[in-house]
Image: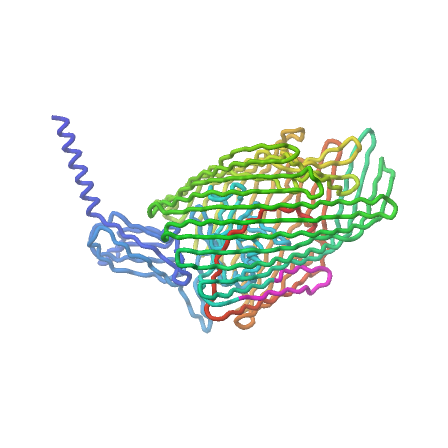
Amino acid sequence: MKTPFKILVITILVGLVAQSVQSSSVISGRIYDADFSEPLPSATVVLLNPADSSLMAGVISNYDGEFHISGILPGNYLLEIGFIGFHSVSHLIDLSERDLNLGDIYLHAQTHEIGEALIVAERRRAGSNGVLTTYHVNNRMEKVSATGVDVLSLIPGVQIDLMQNLTIQGRQNIKVLVNNIERDLNFLRQLDASRILKVEVNMAPGAGYEAVTDGVINVILKERETGWNGHVHVEAPITQNEYYLFPNFGLNVGIGKFNFFTSYDGEFSGFDIEERSRHTASLDGLTRDFTSVQEVVQDYRSHRFHYGFDFYLNERNLFNFYAYTNPFSNEHDGNLLHRLTENGETLYSHDGSKRDNDRNNRSFYSLYYRHSFNSNHEISTDVTIFRFKGENQTWFEFDDADDFSNSVNPYQINYSMKIDHKIALNESLLLRSGFRHVRTEMKERQNDDFRYRENLLGVYSEISGQYGRFGFGSGIRMEERKVSEQTVGDYSDVDFFPSFRAGFTFENGHRLEMRYTRMISRPHIYQMNPQLMMHDPMFSSVGNPALKPSFSNNFQLEHSLGFGSGFFSSQLFFNHHSNFVGGYTELNSSGLLERNYLNLGGVEQYGIEMVAAVNLLNRVSISPYVKVYRNISESTGNIGRVTDMAVETAFSAAVELGKSTSASVMFQHNSPVTTFQNKYWHDALYFITLDQKIGKNLTAGLKSALPLSGTFAYHAFEINGNDFSSNASGNISLSELPLWFYARWQFGGGKNINRVGRDKEDFNNLPSKGF
């Protein structure tokens, strides 16, 4: 009898639970910012008793603006929805059915009038869903920015140096997307800042990105429709000692189902530079001390021409062609002095000259197609060709010594095809998968011994989900590489790159996120090219075609919080790199220094980094960034273990000085860091801009870099070995107040066009030369 009794009790309990579930209701909806038509995360949703306004239930919206209130009995209720800086809305609801979906709910920003001034309450600067940190571009950020690059420089953790090289939180292999489609920094340089709605930063890319990707920036544009539009941006130096100019223009024309676009961005810089180096070596009881001083003028010139079209066959099918060509050169011409002493006695002191002939060209072609089965299911394919060709010669000529020269003529071409598929399995789960094939060919046109061919096939699958306050993502990427090189022969390898993340958002708005990714870093053509380079009579370097890739395992634990209109995030991290690729310098039997590129060993980094985005007094937006970490390198050779502490800092601010006048300031500084033999650093960098809006379409301004500094060390390094030491630095001579003037004119007719973003592969990694 006991068994039937247990069955009866269980049956009754199950029935009671089922009845309870059936009698409860679920209220759901999605909250939007009415001005920008985008979701509002962390909005407050409360359910009240209409009789006495007592609280019955309450939740906050998730990152996508969605909310769900479950376990509510049928009846009449008052639903109130609010968000800081926005007007609240109320709904009287009658729960006569089990579920009630209120659909899309729009909140409008609050405004307050004081005299003749209209003040608009500010929205939150940023928010995080664990995968992406989204930074909204407010009015003052837009006012002090002419281009997309200017906007990026105001994002916490983003650093753009004087030559507009991009790093995020110290990482360099960054993909730049526009509307979720890959571009590059040069595209952002000609992009009008007023077109940018927000910037999404992803510092833990999953399996859907190539394993070399350190981070992703996705620039989301404001929606535009049809017509034509364009802009012209010009810059001119005011001081005579230096120039530093980035002119650009863009034009879009829509005709029927076609959108044709073309643009240009230029880079021109000229500085007086002093390059100093010193090498000291001891061999067979003799101590040699060599010094080199080069006083040169840098002349950097780059022209990039973009062109292409979009063809909208219908709402579900899009074709796109995009291409660019980019001739550029970087030459340092001037005088030099070489001096060599041995045991304190001068062996020679030679005056001479240095002359560069530098000609390079990059070109890129892409054909893209995307088909949308519905709003939750799409597939895209992309075929690209990238080509790089360089001719780099340097002559050192002396009056009373032998001349010498360097010459490298690298060539690289890449063919790439990839297919990406995305489908929503249900309201909570998203599945991504795809593959990519890249064929790479590299050679030195002066050296038949260097012929490198690589075929890379990558496949991936990634699933992500969001269940209430809990979100997760997991994926795996496999890459098979087949290499053929004349000096080391043929070989192949297969590598797997897993990724995982999990996060939870608490009711008070705090969020915790854990992430893991495995990544790869492949050597570039200048590290692999075996052509000998003589930097001076005592120091040479040569590439290594046998280099292997470097792998890294990355762990992160992040806490983020939105408060008022501000945002704060802190992160503990641990990164381990194996087979680290770097230069290794030795003293040869002739007393000369030789640098070879090798897989040196392992590097570990662990520490904490913090970013914030804050609005103050409705006039100031500030974005600080700090990273403190320990850097440990341990060689597989005789270098041993090297430990160092390092700090990275950055700060940017945008200030409204008046209705049409704005200013901005940016500051960056990284402390020296030692990895194996090599210690690198540079001076602090800072910019100041002042902008004046003139009418509706014209903006003029002044920009200054490093005012009152006089000189700037843009690179410096030290190398220490058992019997030698070497150090070098490059210093720019500047006016006390370097100034550049710029003006930007926007024009258009009809409605504007939102050009479709396109994939852009950037395969080459050029070494730095000069500033």
Residue 470 shows up from this direction: yes
- Residue 565: image x %, image y %? 45, 57
Query: For residue 95, which quarter of the picture?
Result: bottom left
Residue at the extreme left of the image, as rendered: 1
- Residue 39: image x %, image y %? 39, 56
Q: State left or right for residue 539 relative to residue 390.
A: right
Residue 613 shows up from this direction: no
Front-most of residues 362 and 501: 362
Query: For residue 242, which quarter of the picture?
Result: bottom right
Q: How many marks?
A: 0
- Residue 460: image x %, image y %? 45, 40
Inspect the magenta stretch and tell me whether residue 535 lies in it. Answer: no
Q: Quadrant of the N terminus?
A: top left
Front-most of residues 688 and 461: 461
Front-most of residues 241 and 437: 437
- Residue 393: image x %, image y %? 74, 48
Front-most of residues 679 and 591: 591
Report the magenta stretch's main SS. strand
**Residue at image location 80% in from the left, 49% down from the top:** 336
* Vertical placement of residue 58 versus 243, above or below: above
**Residue at image location 42% in from the left, 44% down from the top:** 432
* Vertical placement of residue 715 versus 741, above or below: above
Q: State left or right for residue 85 relative to residue 300.
A: left
* Vertical placement of residue 260 versus 337, above or below: below
The segment highlighted magenta reads 230-247
